[in-house]
């Protein structure tokens, strides 16, 4: 499966599932990233960390490690 980390800048994808566990998974869900939601990658920092995305109408920055836990299609 592809993860959010692999999506190119400007592309939109849909979340299939979250692979994290416990508090990390809960934190990602609290930020609005849940199964079925559309996510658009806006920017990636020069060294690749963090990744800025648009989800549910607001901008959000995610670490690469967190983006790797989000499977998309």
Image: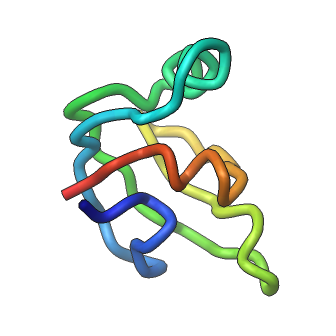
Q: Position of residue 21 (x, y in %)?
A: 54, 22
Residue that extends furthest to the bottom in the rendered view of this protein: 46
Which is more toward the observer, 26 or 1?
1
Q: Position of residue 51 (x, y in %)?
A: 65, 63
Which is more toward the observer, 53 or 1?
1
> Colour mode?
rainbow
Q: Is 17 left or right of 68, judged from the image as shown?
A: left
Residue that extends furthest to the right in the rendered view of this protein: 47
Q: Residue at x 26, y 29 (%)?
A: 35
Q: Is 59 left or right of 18, judged from the image as shown?
A: right
Q: Is residue 23 above or below residue 69?
A: above
Q: Position of residue 16 (x, y in %)?
A: 22, 41
Give the image quarter of residue 52.
bottom right
Which quadrant: the N terminus?
bottom left
Q: Is residue 3 above or below residue 19?
A: below
Which quadrant: the C terminus?
bottom left
Q: Position of residue 44 (x, y in %)?
A: 66, 75
Give the image quarter of residue 4.
bottom left
Q: Residue at x 30, y 64 (%)?
A: 2
Q: Residue at x 64, y 24 (%)?
A: 24
Q: Is residue 48 above or below residue 31?
A: below
Tell how many labels.
Answer: 0
Which is more toward the observer, 58 or 25?
25
């Amino acid at each position: 499966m592809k993860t959010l980390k692999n999506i190119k800048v400007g592309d939109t994808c849909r979340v299939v599932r979250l692979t994290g566990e416990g508090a990390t998974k809960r934190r990602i869900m609290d930020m609005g990233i849940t199964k079925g939601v559309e996510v658009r990658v806006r920017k990636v920092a020069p060294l690749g960390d963090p990744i800025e995305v648009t989800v549910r109408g607001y901008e959000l920055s995610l670490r690469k490690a967190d983006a790797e836990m989000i499977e998309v299609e």
